[in-house]
Image (cartoon, helix red, strand yellow):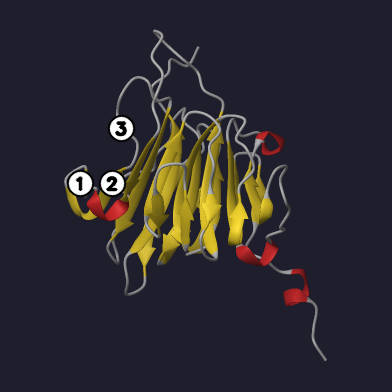
Amino acid sequence: MMLPQQLGSSRTSLKPDHLLHVPDSFVRTPLPGMERCTAIIHAGPALGARFTEYTAEMEEGGKLGPATAQRFLYVVSGQVQTQNELLDAGSYAYAPESHTVTATKTTQLVVIEKTYHAIHGQFPKAFTGKLANIPQQPLMGDEGLLVQTLIPDAPEFDFAVNVMTFLPGVALGMVEMHIMEHGLMMLAGGGIYRLGDNWYPVMAGDFIWMAPYCPQWFGALGKTPAQYLIYKDWNRHPL
């Protein structure tokens, strides 16, 4: 006899200032305009987030629906055709407005969408890139904690997306607490994440939302590097 799913147990946890969303609690739903594609919505206004982040699971020939805001996507696995380029695993794209995304094989994407806030009449342009081509920079001089910046540090962009890689046993050098909110997707490895006054084991496939001023810290465990893709709002005055 098959028992109920872990008798109601899950690592998924929702608190006022954070969410840990893990695969055993994912619910899939199509979004308007999607074809042969479903979304696992991790964060959005209903949660209190000022952005939306979801995983898109696409069949071959599947399409994302039109974007109603600027969109960033990262290819976790598979391959997609954008309007101008073919993107495979480890590639990413930014578009300031709606664009075409079609899967050429079974594909998993991380998709981030955010309403744009312009300043000084500057507007960003679409671009694509590949993680393997982005140099790794030590964070605060720690050679075991490496950062790759996927969106240019330029005033026309109002959010940032980075990939952080922690060698086994390496941890953040401080408990961070700041005005920015985060959406974080674990790409590889695992470790322990402190969120508020809670400590969680996390692993590849988990998603974390952190509200502004949520205390946060991460330490990598295991024998392989831990890696995550992280969003934050950026480059705008708090007012």
Give the SS element for disc 3. loop
Q: Residue 148's mark?
A: 2
Q: Is residue 35 left or right of residue 133?
A: right
**Mark earlier in primary sequence (1, 2):** 1
126 is higher (above) or lower (below) than 58: above
Task: Residue at 42% x, 11% y: name it.
Answer: 119
Quarter of the view holding residue 57 = bottom right
For the residues bearing labels 1 and 2, Cβ distance under 8 angstroms: yes
Q: Which residue is mark 3?
A: 152
Give the SS element for disc 2. strand
Q: Residue 88's mark?
A: none
Q: Residue 137's mark?
A: 1
* Inter-mark Cα distance, 1 to 2: 7 Å
* Inter-mark Cα distance, 2 to 3: 11 Å
Q: Indicate the amino acid at tag 1.
A: Gln
Task: Residue at 56% x, 25% y: name it.
Answer: 115
Give the foreground label among 2 and 3: 3
62 is higher (above) or lower (below) than 174: below
Q: Indicate the amino acid at tag 2.
A: Gln
Q: What is the x, y in percent for residue 111? A: 53, 46
- Label 2 Cα neighbours within 10 Å, binned few <14 / some 14-19 / many ≥20: many
24 is higher (above) or lower (below) than 125: below
Residue closest to the far right: 1
Task: Residue at 68% x, 52% y: name it.
Answer: 35
Say which quadrant the N terminus sits in: bottom right
Q: Is residue 199 in sight in this rendering?
A: no
Task: Residue at 49% x, 53% y: name it.
Answer: 185
Q: Indicate the amino acid at tag 3.
A: Pro
Q: What is the x, y in percent for residue 231? A: 45, 40
Q: Is residue 229 in sight in this rendering?
A: yes
